[in-house]
């Protein structure tokens, strides 16, 4: 039954996103597979946290889209997510959910919250930070860089990073709280366990998840920026001279500038997610609910 519920919910969400051009055909197909597996294995808390990231980030990508369009032209990925981007943002979370089924432990849930906080914070930093009225600065040198440059950060983007991480922490707490009264499987049990770890009041369990979300969001987004500035493959447009993340621009092939060819935007996202999950685990340990 859970498989069919997950499939129906995933088809509805992915279909709506495809109709709004937030997902490509391959992205929609990947989202259906990812969402169905997440719900059938982890149920509402895991699936809901994934959907919270996707819906909120999709809405932000459409906010003032025309103003951000020129900057996005240099991104390797735009607001239309394909299968690779869906896998990069949600694949690690699915692996953690599977791990929770195989060997139940609250640590899986903590890491999952951190991973989802990392991808959310990074997306929010990009979407909201791109609207900053001040020029971004390189996270490595502190010098001003062009909007859209990998490794460029702004004060607005950092605030968005924190907001994204806290949003996921709050969503994860609420969804786990709603599901704690009717645990349906090992993965749900791992999520529900954090809500009873020495707490006398439901709100006492909110702070640890907010801390995990904030830690995961900051660690994931900032590591993403650092890796992007240092090792991500970058190119220079032979026509307009812009430094970009994709191999072509202005209708012509771009010239390799720096970084490793395999270190694509998706690879950077996955590595940032790993840092986010590790940071959330550390926060959970310090908070005493692992």
Image (cartoon, rainbow, N blue to C red):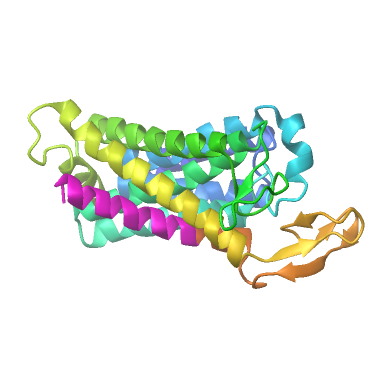
Residue lying at 65% horizontally and 27% vertically, measured from the top left: 63
Q: In this view, does 232 lie above or below 179?
A: below
Q: In this view, does 116 lie above or below 261?
A: above
Q: Is residue 174 above or below residue 28?
A: above
Q: Is residue 87 among the parts visible in the rendering?
A: no
Question: Magenta includes 275?
Answer: yes
Does the magenta stretch mainly form a helix, a strand or a loop?
A: helix
| Side of 49 relative to 161 (left or right) | left
| Side of 48 relative to 82 (left or right) | left
Q: What is the x, y in percent for residue 11?
A: 54, 39
Residue lying at 61% horizontally and 60% vertically, measured from the top left: 229
Q: What is the x, y in percent for residue 99?
A: 29, 60
Quadrant in which the N terminus is drawn: top left
Q: Is residue 30 among the parts visible in the rendering?
A: yes
Residue lying at 64% horizontally and 54% vertically, measured from the top left: 150
Residue 167 occupies quadrant: top left
| Side of 258 relative to 228 (left or right) | right
* Count of number-bearing discs: 0
Q: What is the x, y in percent for residue 120?
A: 48, 42
Residue 141 occupies quadrant: bottom right
Question: Magenta includes 76?
Answer: no
| Side of 255 relative to 144 (left or right) | right
Question: What span is colored magenta in the figure?
Answer: 271-290
Residue lying at 25% horizontally and 62% vertically, measured from the top left: 102
Residue 69 occupies quadrant: top right
User: In the image shown, does 25 or 124 lie closer to the viewer?
Assistant: 124
User: In the image shown, does 138 or 128 lie closer to the viewer?
Assistant: 138
Q: What is the x, y in percent for residue 90?
A: 47, 51
């Amino acid at each position: 039954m859970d498989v069919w519920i997950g499939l129906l919910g995933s088809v509805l969400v992915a279909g709506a996103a495809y109709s709004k051009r937030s997902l490509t055909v391959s992205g929609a197909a990947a989202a259906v597979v990812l969402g169905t597996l997440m719900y059938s294995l982890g149920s509402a808390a895991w699936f809901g946290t994934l959907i919270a990231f996707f819906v909120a980030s999709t809405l932000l990508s459409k906010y003032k889209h025309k103003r951000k369009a020129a900057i996005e032209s240099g991104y390797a990925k735009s607001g239309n997510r394909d299968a690779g981007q869906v896998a990069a943002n949600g694949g690690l979370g699915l692996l953690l959910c599977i791990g929770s089924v195989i060997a139940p432990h609250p640590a899986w849930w903590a890491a999952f919250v951190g991973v989802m906080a990392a991808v959310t914070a990074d997306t929010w930093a990009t979407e909201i930070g791109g609207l900053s009225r001040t020029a971004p600065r390189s996270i490595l040198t502190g010098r001003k860089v062009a909007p859209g440059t990998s490794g460029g950060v702004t004060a607005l983007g950092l605030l968005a990073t924190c907001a994204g991480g806290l949003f996921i922490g709050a969503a994860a707490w609420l969804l786990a709280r709603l599901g704690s009264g009717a645990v349906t499987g090992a993965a749900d049990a791992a999520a529900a366990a954090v809500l009873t770890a020495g707490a006398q009041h439901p709100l006492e369990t909110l702070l640890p998840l907010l801390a995990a979300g904030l830690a995961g969001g900051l660690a994931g987004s900032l590591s993403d920026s650092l890796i992007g500035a240092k090792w991500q493959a970058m190119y220079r447009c032979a026509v307009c001279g812009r430094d970009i993340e994709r191999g072509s621009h202005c209708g012509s092939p771009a010239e390799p500038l720096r970084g490793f060819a395999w270190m694509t935007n998706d690879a950077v996202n996955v590595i940032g997610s790993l840092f986010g999950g590790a940071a959330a685990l550390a926060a959970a340990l310090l908070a005493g609910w692992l």
